[in-house]
Structures are given as C-alpha cells and as structure tokens.
Image (cartoon, rainbow, N blue to C red):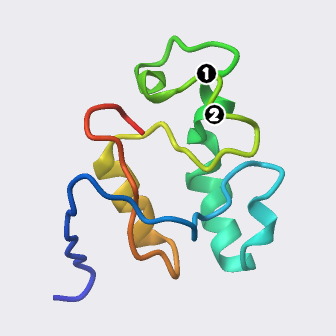
Amino acid sequence: APGITEWTTTESSYCPGGNTEVSPSTVGTNSEEVAAVLRAQATPHQCYNLCSVSSSSPQCLGFLPGVDAPNSTALCLPVSSCLALCAATPGCSGVDAHRTLPR
C-alpha cells in the first residue's frame, strides 16, 4: 500500500559508512531537500546537541559522553522514531540503532 514502509531487522550488525550528516554544522552537505527534512526533524535530536550540556531528558539515556561529539551523526531517539524519520527522508534506506538505548 502507498505510504507504508516495511523494514528488515538484522541483529548484531550495522551499516558501515553512508551516515547522513545531521549536526548543525554539516547538515547542509546533504541535498537541499534532505537537509530541510533533517534540520526540522533530526538535528534537534542529535545526541550531542540535545544532551552534552544537560542530560535530563529521557532521550539522553542514549548519549555516550566521549563518543558523541559536535559532528556526531547519532540521534537520541527510539528506534520507531528513527525509522519514521528515515521514511520521511528522501534516499534513506535504513537506520543503525542500539538494542536497548534511545540511539
């Protein structure tokens, strides 16, 4: 049916490379269409931006100090939100997600 996206889960695996730039300083390196979606829906949830100063949000359980940096592509979102964002982003074909953390 139109508008429905099916996802396949592959356990204990990740997709190397090909991450979409979501940090405020690099989001513009994507196509204009993709950058517009990401600025509105992804950048506010970038783990570093959201959690490096104050980690009181429940989403910040996915923040990894010392790993997440200003140019990190990690989003502190539950898997369902990451998949919805991917479905709304032109050219996105999947997400890497932590098994238990909102990341």
Identify the residue at horizontal 80%, vertical 57% (top origin): 26
Q: CA distance from mark 1 to mark 2?
A: 6 Å
Q: Callout 2 environment at 10 Å: few (<14), some (14 to 19), or many (20+)?
A: some
Horizontal placement of 54 versus 28: left or right? left
- Rendered residue at 67%/21% (across/down): 52
x then y, percent, for residue 4: 22, 78
**Amino acid at pointer 2:** Asp
Tell me the residue at 56%/40% (across/down): 45
Secondary structure state at the residue bearing disc 2: loop
The x, y position of residue 81, in whole percent, is 36, 50
Viewed as shown, does residue 64 lie left or right of 78? right
Q: Most extreme residue toward the bottom, as rendered?
A: 2
Q: Identity of the amino acid at label 1?
A: Pro
Which quadrant of the figure contains the C terminus? top left
Give the camera-side residue of 71 and 15: 15
Task: Please tell me whether residue 74 is drawn above or below residue 1 in the rendered image.
Answer: above
Expressed as whole percent of the image width and height from the top left, the position of residue 73 reads 61, 50
- Residue that mark 1 sits on: 65
The residue lying toward the viewer, choosing from 19 and 55, is 19
Viewer-closest of 31 and 1: 31
Quadrant, the N terminus: bottom left
In the rendered structure, the answer to whether residue 37 lies left or right of residue 5 reads right
Q: x and y percent of residue 98 in the render?
A: 34, 41
For mark 1, does the 10 Å Cα neighbourhood hold few (<14), some (14 to 19), or many (20 or more) residues?
few
Q: Secondary structure at mark 1?
A: loop
Name the residue that disc number 2 marks.
Answer: 68
